[in-house]
Every structure is written in structure tokens, then in C-alpha cells.
Image (cartoon, rainbow, N blue to C red):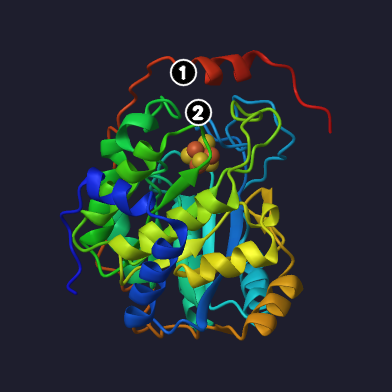
Amino acid sequence: MATRHNWTKEEILEIYNKPLMELLYEAATVHRKNHDPNTVQVSTLLSIKTGGCPEDCGYCPQAARYHTNVEGNDLMSVNQVKAQALRAKESGSSRVCMGAAWRNVKDGEEFDSVLEMVRTINKLDMEVCCTLGMITENQAQRLAEAGLYAYNHNLDSSEEYYKEVISTRGYQDRLDTIGNVRKTNVTVCSGGIIGMGESADDRAGMLVALSTLSPQPESVPINALVPVEGTPMEEQEPVSIWEMVRMVATARIVMPETQVRLSAGRTQMSREGQAMCFFAGANSIFAGDKLLTTPNPDVNEDMELFRSLGLNPQKAFEKKEQPQSVSAEESQYQNLGEKPKWSRPGHKIERNLEAQQKPKAKA
Ligand code: SF4
């Protein structure tokens, strides 16, 4: 069946709410038609610049305005990143995703340094992904030229519920950034988080937003909120494994060719729960004991799980060929010193405001 780009919320909700055995069967069938069910892509997420972020994302311990125990770090050096990438490669990752706690990319020395990191990791024959906040078309082109394989920019939730989570930028900014990435040959990674207090309707709304993109994102991370002390969502109840399985299965059915990534929240899942997610169509994980700042299973635990389930890590560039890295000197796209006006809706979100008033959590 051809990939559809016209899913409605009602259709997606109907899939999400199916009896679980039917949902699993349908998702696993779609999965087998489009992917090798025994191959799982493994990425390592590296926080290259941690904390001190000016945004107010209600789930995030890196937002400067909340009082969490995250220690901020300046941008890593290219050599530090190279060393970590080599370690990730040795432990079976085919992709490195570099995350910087920025609202948006600013042209200048730090971005030049990130471009050099992209070139360096691409030369290690690993897929390189970045998540750096909002970017302009020129910045996306510069990343593409450096050899970037994927850009991550999550929609987080439905457009309606997004307003309950973040007040410092708008949903359209997210879509515009994804649009800018799409003007290059860089693949798109975009997904969201469940367990932030949203309804099933919002989960379906997020899947509508993602599945109606044309082309659909090559990669869709599904995160389960990890509530962190000091953030506005510190008291959220963790989602059940059944909700996670339903979300993964529904994403698989409506986005058959996409790699569905089992992302944050795996430490709260049993091995059996994770296996069910793989059966439902998840075919990527993040490896390493930290996901930016939140805990993640140990690499050895993951490899043991892979062995038990007979899963194999996907090799780099199996889905798309390796991009060429153009050196800084030969680049066609220059630093334009742009100052784009990304939106600031600035509406009030009570729980975000309350979290700002609270004293710092004890270490
Ligand atoms: S999710 Fe990203 S943009 Fe939002 S506060 Fe955290 S680091 Fe900043």
C-alpha cells in the first residue's frame, strides 16, 4: 500500500484504540513489508552543549529558568566530540546525534565549530545528526554541505497541546525549520513525547502533523516523558507500557517507511515491554547511559537484549548513501550573519511559571 499523507485524526484515533492484539498484528505486518524486522538502528546521543537554554519547554531540565540539578557545559571541542564518536562506533552505534541546548542556531564561531564536528564524524563513516534548535535555510544548507545525514527537530505534541508545554516559540516555527531542512538532502527526524498530560486526541494530532508531511520524516522518535525534579512536569505519572506500544504501533501504521525510534523513557520499561515495542514496529534506539541529561539503559544491557531477541544493529548508510563533506574553504554557502525573527507567543503556562518560582531541587 502506498504511503498516505492524508490521515485524519479520527482515523488515527481509531487505529490507536484498536484491541491491542489486532493493533500489534497490523503494525507488525506493515513493519515486515517495509523493513527487516530483525534490524534495529542504534544511535548515540551526545550533549555537545548542555543547559542554560532560554526556552521554557515544560519537560526539559536544560531550561535555565527551572531549578534542576543539570550542570551546564559550554560547547565541546571538536576533539572531544571525535573521541566520543569513536567510542560510540566501537560499541555498535551507526549514528551520532549531537544536541545543543540552543533556541536557534546563530551564525558565528560556535556554529562553525559544529560544522567541523559534522565533517569529522562523517569522515569516521558514521551517520551524523544534529539537534540545535531552529535553523534557517542557509544554515541547513551549510550543515548539508558539511556532511550532515539527519536533522532532528521534534514537534513534541499536537499543535493544540504544544501551547500547554512551551510559550517561548510557536508550532509553526518547528514546521518552518523542518521545511528548511527539507530544502536540502539532509533527512528529517521529528517526533514527540507522550506522558506530558496530553490526551489520546493530542497524540493522534501529533501523528497527523507528522504523517501529513510530504515526504514523511525518515525518522520519528517516540519519547516517554522522564519527569525530572525541578521541571514543571516533575509530578507527571509515567506512561504505561501499553500506551507506548500503542503509540509506536500507530506511528508504524501511518508512517510505514519511517524509522520509529524508541527514545527517552526506556529505563522505565521492562525488557519484555521493549521487545513488544520492537514487534510493534520500533526499529531504532538511542544507546548510551545518558540521553542528553536523562538516564538510559547501559550499552551492554542493550546488546544483551539484542542477543536475546536475535536483533542486529543496522549498518551506517544502509537506508541512504553517505553524504560528501565539503571543506569550510570550498563551501558555497557562507555565514550570512542572519538574525531571523522566530516567534515568541509568550502566553502564560501556569505550571511553567510555578516551576520558575520553586527553589532548586536538592542534589
Ligand atoms: S527542549 Fe531544547 S529548546 Fe527546550 S528547553 Fe530543552 S534544550 Fe531548550
Secondary structure under tag 2 reads loop
Residue 235 in the image, given as x and y percentages of width and height: 66, 28
CB of mark 1 within 8 Å of CB of mark 2? yes
Residue 289 in the image, given as x and y percentages of width and height: 72, 61
Q: Is mark 1 within 8 Å of ligand 1?
A: no
Question: Looking at this view, is 126 or 195 the one in front?
Answer: 195
Question: Looking at this view, is 116 or 356 the one in front?
Answer: 356
On-image quarter of the C terminus: top right
Secondary structure under tag 1 reads loop
Quickly name the residue at label 2: 56
Residue 145 in the image, given as x and y percentages of width and height: 32, 70
* Residue pictured at 60% horizontal, 60% vertical: 46
Residue density around tag 2, few if under 14, some if 14–19, many if 20 or more, within 10 Å: many
Q: Nearer the viewer, mark 1 or mark 2?
A: 1
Going by the numbered disc 1, the residue's amino acid type is: Ile
Answer above or below: position of 172 versus 309: above
Answer above or below: position of 292 versus 42: above
* Residue pictured at 64% horizontal, 37% vertical: 227
Answer with mark 1 or mark 2, whichever residue precedes in sequence: 2
Residue 1 in the image, given as x and y percentages of width and height: 19, 74
Question: Looking at this view, is 134 or 270 the one in front?
Answer: 270
Answer above or below: position of 113 versus 185: above
Q: Is mark 2 within 8 Å of ligand 1?
A: yes
Going by the numbered disc 2, the residue's amino acid type is: Asp
